[in-house]
Amino acid sequence: MCVAFPMRVTAVTGDRGRVALGDVEQEVSLELLDNVAVGDYVIVHAGFALQTLDRGEAAETLAMLGALTRPEEEPAP
């Protein structure tokens, strides 16, 4: 199974970009996309930006991923 994450573009230099998700930053290839700009959200997998997302889609996806990492609430006694 593959997992790809939405990340915010913080810098663009040619066909390379710097992306961030929380405290994690990495350099990725932007070769597969056209017109990526700082502030855009992209889906990143294996070092490549695969798709752009609008801000709302990115927020929704990040909220769902965050819910998966939080412990479930214990039932009330």
Image: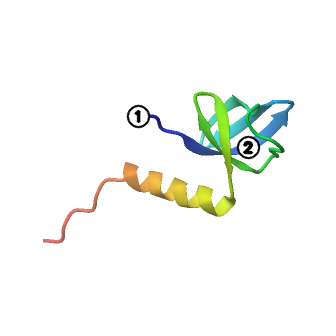
Residue 12 position by quadrant:
top right
Q: Position of residue 74 (x, y in %)?
A: 22, 62
SS class, disc 2: strand
First along the sequence among labels 2 and 1: 1
In this picture, residue 26 sits left or right of residue 1: right
Q: Amino acid at mark 2?
A: Val
Residue 9, numbered label: 2
- Quadrant where the C terminus lies? bottom left
Return the residue found at the far right: 14
The relative height of residue 21 versus residue 57 in the rendered view (above or below) is: above
Disc 1 target residue: 1
Q: Position of residue 60 (x, y in %)?
A: 54, 61
In this picture, residue 50 sits left or right of residue 76: right
Residue 30 position by quadrant:
top right
SS class, disc 1: loop
Cβ atoms at labels 2 and 1 below 8 Å apart: no
